[in-house]
Image (cartoon, rainbow, N blue to C red):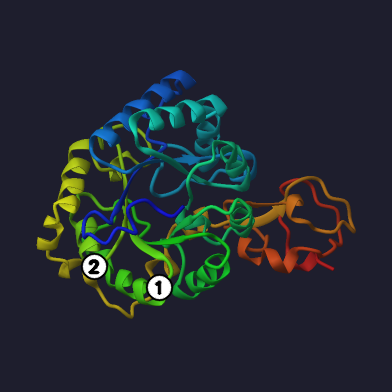
Amino acid sequence: MGFPRTENTTPGENVFVIAEIGKNFIQTEADQPVERYIENAKTLIDAAADAGADAAKFQTHTVEDEQLDTHIVSPHFQASDRYSWVKRNTEATPERFWREVQDHCHHRGILFCTTPMSRGALRKIIPLNPPFWKVSSADVQDHILLHAMLETRKPVIISTGMVSLIELDRVVATIGKQCPQLGVLYCVSQYPCPQEQFNLASITRFIHTYPDAVIGFSDHSIGPEASLAAVKLGARIIEKHFSLSRDLWGSDHKVSMTPAEMRSMVDAIRNRSFQDVNASPFLGDLNRELEGATNAYRPYFGKMLVAGRDLSAGSVLTEDAIYAMRPAMGASGMRSDALQKVLGKRIAKALHKYDPIASNILQ
């Protein structure tokens, strides 16, 4: 199975629209019972279905193998340090959360899908058998996560907001041959993204460079204009953050589309009025490097390789003994895309769980 709608040949009908609920079921600074988060999620699913979205997408966290316990605050959300925020998301979404959310999606006739942020998060969702996986911009180079995804033999969608063109080429070459279908979404990881930062000419470039992939756009701007311009240029997947209000508390509400805005955008796609949009303000330069090459969030959200358990000196590094964790900044661990250079090597000294795996300890 591929991505719904994208094999349709009718313009407007061939666009797969994803309402990115993410973690927008968290709406207050004070923690709430899991039951409240479930009800909030169901309300968002109802709103996404009523607005005509094809899929309701969430984000799945498992703090143990995603975020190191260090005090790092991302510039895009300063109300919480990263470890506390990921820990809260993990605790807010036990197994019953995911089962009830998926059941409600089925009840409303909208696809359930999610972005697992680590291998542990992926394993939590595998029993639910989602139709495909979404990889965040920050995790496109997490080879531990990618390897675990590929083992499921499901389609994969990746975002490109934190990679260079060369890095993207490597990822597409690595996973494109191993999954049933690959989606590549142009993305600028700014929250929100101003119009002048877009380079939608990259969509045209992707269509020609990756002919076997389904090309789309993960849009962090306010309003529908950039997404409609992307559809005009040939995007067949549109992903927009989705919330009941941009005034709610949390990391992503401020860059989200409201239900009325989502309904308006979906209508413009289906009735083909997107063809009247002036795409030129969003185009940029076909030959420009991806914004992700120098994205300011890479140090906060990039991952390094660490010991996934206590390891004695002389241990052989296997994939199950390694975690890829954020942040990559300020530590000596090898980048998560260096996994193949590490596997099968012995370590010269003992490592405690979460110690970085540095190149100078490999034998």
Q: From the viewer's side, name the closer residue of 225 and 72.
A: 225
Q: Hey, which residue is sitting farthest left in the picture?
A: 276
Give coordinates of residue 230: x percent, y percent. Answer: 25, 62
The residue that disc 2 covers is 233
Give coordinates of residue 176: x percent, y percent. Answer: 52, 66
**Res 51 visible:** yes
37 in relation to 74, above or below: above
Q: Toward which corner of the image does residue 242 lie, by quadrant?
A: top left
Query: Mark 1: which amino acid?
Result: Pro
The residue depicted at 81 percent of the width and 51 percent of the height is 351
Local packing at callout 2 (Cα closer than 10 Å; few below 14, some 14-19, many 20+) is some
Query: Mark 2: which amino acid?
Result: Leu
Give coordinates of residue 101: x percent, y percent. Answer: 44, 29
Which disc number belongs to residue 211? Answer: 1
The C terminus lies in quadrant: bottom right
Q: From the viewer's side, name the closer residue of 7 and 334.
A: 7
